[in-house]
Image (spheres, rainbow, N blue to C red):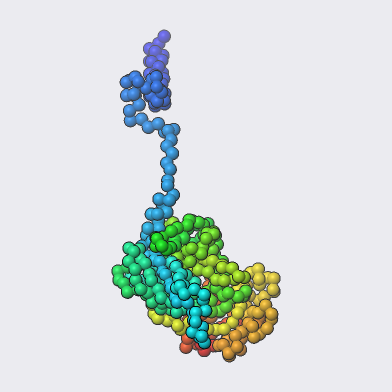
Amino acid sequence: MSKTKEILIILVIIIVSGLSGIIANRYIFPRLAMTKFFGKYDFIKKSTENITVINKTEQVFIKEDSSINKIVSQVTSSVVNITSYAAPEKNALSGKNTNTTTQLVIKSGTGLIVASDGLIVTYASAIIPENAKYKVIVSDKNIYDATLIEIDSYSNLAFLKINASNLSVASFANSDEAKPGEKIIAIGNDLPASAPFFAAGILSSFNPSYNLSEKTIASSEKLEGVFEIDNSRQNRYLGGPVVDYSGQIIGITGSVRRDNADSFFQIPSNKVKLVIEKELRKELSMNLLLGIYYISIDKAYALINNLPSETGAQIYSPSGQQGLSVIANSPADIAGLKINDIITEVSGEKITIEKSLPDLLYKHKKGEEIELTILRNSQELKIKIQM
């Protein structure tokens, strides 16, 4: 055998031996070290030092309740309890109580601090809205007398004020970025414990044509476009915030009465912020009154009814009567708006699914002149209205 062949054979033996050692050290010894029998030998234990067994797995359990507590902790300090109480109503003629009991009428609801000097927002039906007194319990359990400032006619959001300072203020998200299917948490505050409680759920949908009018058709004076969630006990969260999993408020829970039942929804945070800004400017009493009932137009409605526009607001009455679609002596009536007119723009801004007729009107105030673009018998008209 030549020296060259001998050298090649020796090299092959060395390479094979080396590979065998690596394989044994990397894969075989770690497994042997995990057994009872071989695990007691030191040379096998040492062979596994600084070796990571890559197929060894661990199960990590995340306690979701703890996660929720951490998320809502950013908001709960601004959530308050509002207790409304009123004496029984008296008959104007006899002076006697119309109620058979002499006890106070008491209502408890949830509110949200939106300014550090004690401005609180809630939904109107979470409180007694007239002839009542109010107590507010904040997160540190301090109790304050509160004054009802105003109820917004567009959103039904109610504002109360307490005499306090340096309060924790709620943080609102951009509700345009909230998408159906996202996880959410509803927050309420209840007596007698006056402690927040929570419900986890899913943001089910954004309903663009849901109008806060309690009628079967939409009102130009009421907010349109709300979130809907899958919480079955929403009455307990009335006036309280709904929070996404980043700890930001995406809406406030409200309700209207329809078909002898309470219908619940969430006012998107972007609309809530507009109302708060208007309250801070002291302009809630200057909301416009156009005076029409209408149907929001989408592609399907336009196709079925052979309309010339796929967006806008069609002045409408189920009975087909002008007097039931346009309120008598309202600005709309004085300006000559008619049933079946389609309003497509308000002062140059186009009505869309995202920007409803009430949303565009809410940007203006009493005393201003607005211009409506309408389609009447497929003809475009510009009508100026003094509000």
Q: Residue at x 55, y 62 (%)?
A: 205
> Residue 243, image x and y in percent?
44, 61
- Is residue 326 visible to us here? yes
Q: Is residue 231 above or below residue 1?
A: below
> Would residue 126 be found to the left or right of residue 306 on screen?
left
Q: Residue at x 36, y 30 (%)?
A: 51
Question: Which quarter of the figure has residue 30?
Answer: top left
- Where is residue 386 drawn, in percent x and y? 52, 89
Query: Is 169 rendered above or below residue 23?
Result: below
**365 to the left or right of 49:** right
Residue 19 visible in rendering = no
- Which sits in the foreground, 357 or 21? 357
In screen coordinates, is 327 left or right of 27? right
**Quadrant of the rendered structure where residue 212 is?**
bottom right
* Whether residue 113 is situated above or below residue 340 in the rendered picture: above
Q: Position of residue 321 (x, y in %)?
A: 68, 83
Please report the residue visible at 35 percent of the width from the left and 66 percent of the height from the top. 138
Q: Residue furthest left?
A: 166
Residue shown at 42% from the left, 70% from the top: 83
